[in-house]
Amino acid sequence: MNHTLAIIKPDATAGGAAGKIIAHLESAGFRVRALRMLTMTTAQARSFYYVHRERPFFASLVAFMTSGPCIPMALEAPDAVAKLRREIGATDPAAAAEGTVRRLYAESKERNAIHGSDSDDNARREIGFFFAGEELLR
């Protein structure tokens, strides 16, 4: 088993889809190992998305991710990172496969319902950003 991070974003939380997304991920075989709800500060969002700081969408991404509550979750499954990427679908919900989280719950490419780690290294870093080691259930 390995781990990955998902964040249910403010659009999905505000739209009442958080429980449906968690149920979707659990039915796909993920086990929730840690979870919390928070509203990210600007400093937290800028730090978490630092890798995108030079991209033209960085400021709007930070504004969006601080606009309301989000739900970071550490998830466990075999090949967790790749499996989550398949379950959430393409960034643009119009291009996402049928039955994926983004196809079902995302509003747009920018308001795309969920974040998922894109590599094992990033998953470890991102989980550590939100959760201390002792917070992860074994």
Image (cartoon, grey):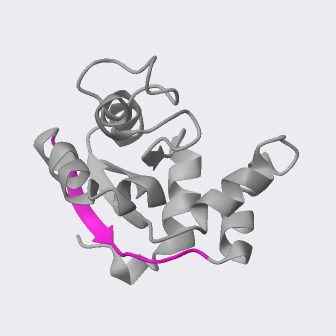
User: Residue at (51%, 76%) from the top-left corner?
Assistant: 39
Q: Residue furthest left?
A: 27
68, above or below 17, in the image: below
Q: Position of residue 77 (x, y in %)?
A: 25, 45
User: Residue at (57%, 67%) from the top-left corner?
Assistant: 67
98, above or below 134, in the image: above
The quadrant of the picture occupied by the C terminus is bottom left
Does 31 appear in magenta?
yes
The picture quadrant where one finds residue 29 is top left
123, above or below 95, in the image: below
Q: Position of residue 32 (x, y in %)?
A: 23, 61
Q: Is residue 31 left or right of residue 102?
A: left
The picture quadrant where one finds residue 136 is bottom left
Q: Is residue 81 left or right of residue 35?
A: right
Whether residue 10 is visible here, answered yes or no, is: yes
| Along the viewing direction, whichever of 125 and 101 lies nearer the viewer | 101
Whether residue 9 is visible here, answered yes or no, is: no
